[in-house]
Amino acid sequence: MEYLIDTNILSDYIKGALPQKTRNVLRKQSIIKISFITRIELLCWKEQEDAIKNLISICSVENITEEIINECINIRRRYAIKLPDAIIAATAISENLTLITGNSKDFKAVRGLKFFKP
């Protein structure tokens, strides 16, 4: 199974607060995939810039595609979800990835989205 990692999971990782169960899942991944939105969100932080840049450098960043754009539009039309979360959900659906997030309440209504909450 391949995963897309949400920003809040990487935040917990950087802070050393990631649950053991999630750390075990991430260790088994040969490639850690993140959305370009997660990259932007992380790089906007003013603390721990070096740690963030190092973490991003080992991730595969999933960039926007027409398929993701169209899926995002469908999600935003159907659900009350913020644009960054809709892009992340659309990325996971379009790329057939399971989203790992600590924020399941924003994603649980989205049909077709597979997610794992630590």
Image (cartoon, rainbow, N blue to C red):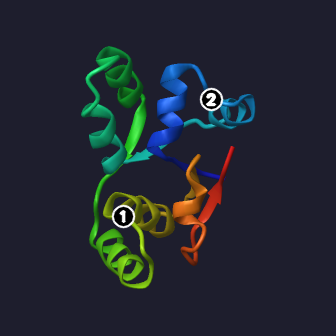
Residue 45: quadrant of the picture: top left
User: Which residue is at the front of the view, 83 or 38?
Assistant: 83
Could you tell me which residue is drawn at 42 percent across and 35 percent down?
59
Amino acid bearing label 1: Lys
Q: Which residue is mark 2?
A: 18
Residue 86: quadrant of the picture: bottom left
Q: Tell me if I can see residue 58 in this picture.
A: yes
Image coordinates of residue 100 in percent, x first then y, are 59, 49
Image coordinates of residue 51 in percent, x first then y, are 38, 17
Count of numbered marks: 2
> Contact, CB < 8 Å: mark 1 with mark 2?
no
Amino acid bearing label 2: Leu
Could you tell me which residue is drawn at 54 percent across and 64 percent down?
107
Find residue 38 and name its label. Answer: none
Find residue 82 and name its label. Answer: 1
Q: How many neighbours does mark 2 have within 10 angstroms: few (below 14), some (14-19), or many (20 or more)?
A: some
Q: Quadrant of the C terminus?
A: top right
Q: Secondary structure at mark 2?
A: loop
Tell which tag, 1 or 2, sits nearer the viewer: 1
Q: Secondary structure at mark 1?
A: loop
Q: How many neighbours does mark 1 have within 10 angstroms: few (below 14), some (14-19), or many (20 or more)?
A: few
Could you tell me which residue is drawn at 49 percent across and 40 percent down?
8
User: Which residue is at the front of the view, 49 or 53?
Assistant: 49
Instruction: Tell me: residue 44, above or below residue 50.
Output: below
Instruction: Tell me: residue 11, above or below residue 118.
Output: above
Q: Earlier in the sequence, mark 1 or mark 2?
A: 2
User: Which residue is at the front of the view, 78 or 54?
Assistant: 78
